[in-house]
Image: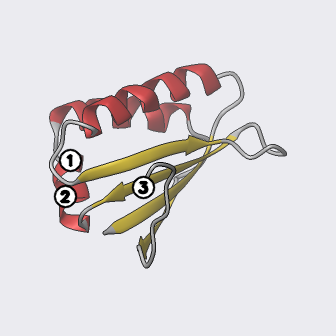
């Protein structure tokens, strides 16, 4: 299992539109092979930053989702609302603890 962290910096005024697009992207991802979970985070002290935490069975599953036309359509919108290119880091999941699990 792999977790990908993507950090984005938003343009002022675009937060609600960006967040809505990301929620739609999560809905799309849930129907894709290899999807495990996702979270959209905003730091308390930086309301224009977003951190996306996505967990997939494999990096290949995530990459296949990135070729999906719905994903590519949202990418253009998201990039327009960002003030800088996002930063992505990959992590191997060593342990996973969740409520009810």
First along the sequence among labels 1 and 3: 1
Q: Nearer the viewer, mark 2 or mark 3?
A: 3
x and y percent of residue 22 in the render? 44, 32
**Cα separation between marks 2 and 3:** 23 Å
Q: Residue at x 19, y 58 (%)?
A: 61
Image quadrant occupied by the C terminus = bottom left
Does 41 appear above or below 81?
A: below
Classify 10 Å Cα crowding around label 2: few (below 14), some (14-19), many (20 and above).
Answer: some
Q: CA distance from mark 1 to mark 3?
A: 26 Å
Rendered image: mark on residue 61: 2
- Tag 1 secondary structure: helix
Residue 23 spot, x, y in % from top left: 44, 28
Marks 2 and 3: CB-CB under 8 Å? no
Secondary structure of the residue carrying numbered label 3: loop
Determine the CA span between mark 1 and mark 2: 6 Å
Q: Residues within 10 Å of mark 3 (few under 14, many from 20)?
A: few
Considering every residue shown, the one lying at the far right of the view is 45
- Quadrant in the picture for residue 21: top left
Q: Nearer the viewer, residue 100 or 53?
A: 100
Q: Is residue 39 above or below residue 19?
A: below
Q: Is residue 55 left or right of residue 5?
A: left
Instruction: Please report contact status of discs 1 and 2: CB closer than 8 Å, yes or no.
Output: yes
Residue that lies at the very extreme toward the front in this rendered image: 100
In which quadrant will I find the N terminus? bottom left
What SS does tag 2 mark? Answer: helix
Q: Position of residue 94 (x, y in %)?
A: 43, 79
Label 3 belongs to which residue? 101
In primary-sequence order, the first of circles 2 and 3 is 2
Q: Who's the residue at 25% across and 63% down the image?
A: 57
């Amino acid at each position: 299992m792999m977790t990908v962290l993507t950090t984005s910096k938003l343009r002022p005024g675009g937060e609600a539109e960006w967040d809505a697009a990301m929620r739609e992207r999560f809905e799309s991802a849930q129907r894709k092979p290899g999807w495990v979970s996702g979270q959209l985070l905003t730091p308390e002290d930086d309301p224009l930053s977003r951190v996306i935490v996505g967990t997939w069975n494999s990096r290949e599953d995530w990459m296949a989702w990135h070729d999906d036309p719905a994903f590519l359509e949202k990418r253009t919108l998201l990039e327009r609302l960002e003030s800088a290119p996002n930063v992505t880091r990959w992590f191997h999941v060593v342990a996973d603890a969740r409520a009810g699990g």
